[in-house]
Image: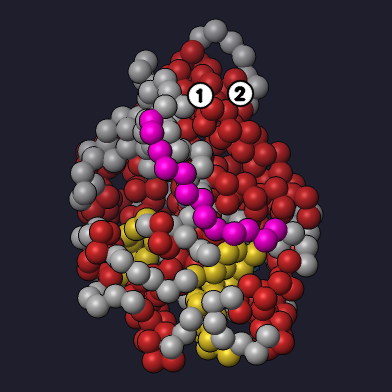
Amino acid sequence: MKNFNYNVSTRILFGRGKINEIGKEVKKYGDKVLIVYGKGSVKRNGLFDVIINNLREYGIYVYELDNIDPNPRIDSVYKGAEICRKEGVKLILAVGGGSVIDCSKAIAAQANYCGDIWQDLYVEQKLQDLKSVLPVASVLTLAATGSEMNGNSVISNMHTNQKLAIGHDLLRPVFSILDPEYTFTVNQYHTAAGIVDILSHLFEQYFTPDHDGYLQNRMMEAMMKTVIEYGPIAYQELNNYEARANLMWTSSLALNGMVTYGKVSTDWATHGMEHELSAFYDITHGVGLGILTPYWMKYVLSKDTVHRFVEYARNVWNLSGNDEIELANLAIEKTREFFTSIGIPSTLEEVGIDGSKLEEMAEQATMFGALGCMKKLYKEDVLAIYKMAL
Ligand code: NZQ
Ligand code: ZN
């Protein structure tokens, strides 16, 4: 196991009714808050009013930035940072899914930054230049990204067809409220996309060619089994509290860093390939991952990587047999069947992506170098996987 400094600093308030603690928590940071939200779901399900009323009781002054897109745009970030600077905002409160939270983190960074964070941090990755940010907190409304408990932010620039990520401990939310009841209104499509995203985060950290990380891999198998158990229940019964609660807590634990502290490596190739699909075609992140993952698995399966697929087959899908490659292939099929059972398409064509930009996307996906560690994926490999997925 590698050395590590454990830091999962976000305070979590989990469960029914926890939203009523929002005013008390926000007040600790001051009395001017910028609430950031998406295209109206939080107004339609009543959450927004509950928050506003509670904040008023504590005498907190509220500014608003709405209309954040899924695959949030850098233009919204500049708008939010401007409000923070002008009004002296003390805390940014993201109310929504990963897009809203990621956008809020970027606003928090830009508000205290002299230059342009898009160019310096997202494009050039000069993360050492980020010295201070406004505090961010979140009220999570969709179980998927883990953004509520990590320091990552993924932002799109539609002018340049780029979707880029940064990760910094300063960007971890100071607190997040996770009330599963506020995820009841997430429709089947976004519920399924969230389920795939959670699983994909686990796959990216689980599928590594080394033989280390025994403890971490067992923790991840438990989380995968939880998603496989409760995902289809939430998909069928949108109001099932236990299913929503299990998905919500797994989404946070799957990508807050905990399961990879000490692991020798992680992969993240599928996310790298998917971000190009979203950058060029603005498709839903989890749907893109669901299409690509089984093709990626097939592509990276070899005698050097089969051991991890065998563990996956036996410990997650309870498959048995002695032929290792056969077991691995069965587990890959199970993965595809699971995605299909919750309505995830299996080809790019089904989401309107044809072959015309695959080469350009493969080029851009590998612009910082080869992707992944199960097998290093160069431009030709990424292109081959995109073509398998057509
Ligand atoms: O905009 P509104 O009206 O709020 O509707 C949203 C949006 O249309 C809706 N929604 C959210 N909560 C709802 C709800 N509808 C009804 N009831 C509710 N309670 O769901 C739609 C999708 O929301 P979005 O925030 O885009 O989804 P998600 O949480 O999957 O976030 C996706 C973004 O996060 C990035 C993705 O690339 C993508 O840009 N990621 C962020 C990561 C991170 N920060 O660690 C890691 C991930 O791998 C991912 O890349
Ligand atoms: Zn993801």
Location of residue 296 in the rendering, given as x and y in whole percent from the top left corner? 40, 36
Closest to the observer: 86 or 319?
86
For residue 177, the mark is: none
Amino acid type for the residue under numbered disc 2: Asn
Magenta stretch contains residue 7: yes
Does residue 319 appear in the picture of this structure?
Answer: yes
Image quarter in which the N terminus is found: top left
Residue at disc 2, CB closer than 8 Å to ligand 2? no
- Tell whether 188 sits left or right of 272: right
How dense is the environment of label 2, judged by Cα within 10 Å: few (below 14), some, or many (20 and up)?
Answer: some
Q: Give the dominant element type of the magenta stretch: helix, strand or loop.
A: loop
Q: From the image, tell me which residue sits under label 1.
A: 214
Magenta stretch contains residue 169: no
Location of residue 43 in the rendering, given as x and y in whole percent from the top left corner? 66, 80
- Tell whether 116 sits left or right of 268: left
Does residue 228 appear in the picture of this structure?
Answer: no
Location of residue 246 in the rendering, given as x and y in whole percent from the top left corner? 70, 48
Location of residue 236 in the rendering, given as x and y in whole percent from the top left corner? 75, 51
Image quarter in which the C terminus is found: top left
* Element assignment for label 2: helix
For residue 315, the mark is: 2
